[in-house]
Image (spheres, helix red, strand yellow):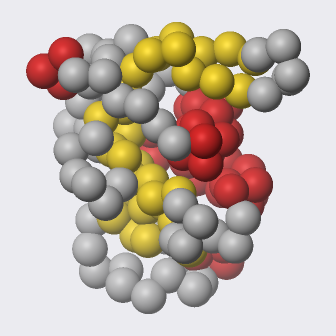
Amino acid sequence: MKGTINFGIDENGKFFFDSLTQRYNTEVEPTELEAEALALIIEATGPVNIYRRSDAYLTICNESGNDFCRLKATDRAKWFSLEVPAEYQNDSLLANVKNKKQRHWKIQLQSIDDIVVYSDIIKAASLIIY
């Protein structure tokens, strides 16, 4: 389950994706909001594999194939969900998570830029290997 991510900064200083290869060799074309969010997640984690396994969100996997993060970024809904490592489960940043009895904890965002606040938790989640 290997993917390729080609990205850069355009002439206007905006982040962009050239291509994202997903499982079954189908390209993922993130929206502008998804690309902004992915840039922040990749900044925290390093290389990841990105898939669109659902119409509702993007799936982000580490190199071992663990889908540690899911992302929804539209004008109407902004959230991501993480497989939260044990050492972060009582973190005050996650106090507003409603359902903590499931594998992925859904974190609502007011703005895509809010992802930066969760960088340490995102990094730790990306290191979970099965």
Q: Is residue 94 left or right of residue 69?
A: right
Q: Name the one closer to the observer, 75 or 37.
A: 75
- In the displayed structure image, the side of residue 52 where residue 119 appears, left or right: right
Instruction: Determine the residue positioned at 52% across, 71% down.
Output: 77
| Residue 120 appears in the rendering | no
* Residue sitting farthest toward the left: 24
Residue 46 horizontal/vertical position (percent): 57, 23
Quadrant of the rendered image containing residue 48: top left
Query: Which quadrant would residue 22 be assigned to in this image?
Result: top left
Residue 125 position in % (x across, y down): 45, 46
User: Horizontal placement of 21 versus 40: left or right?
Assistant: left
Name the residue at 30% across, 35% down. 51
Residue 20 percent across, percent down from the top left: 40, 20
In the image, is 123 to the left or to the right of 125? right
Query: Is residue 2 positioned above or below 48 on the image?
Result: above
Q: Which residue is rendered at x = 47% and y = 37% of the image?
A: 30
Q: Nearer the viewer, residue 130 or 42?
A: 42
> Which residue occupies 37% across, 80% down?
100
Please count the marks in the image: 0
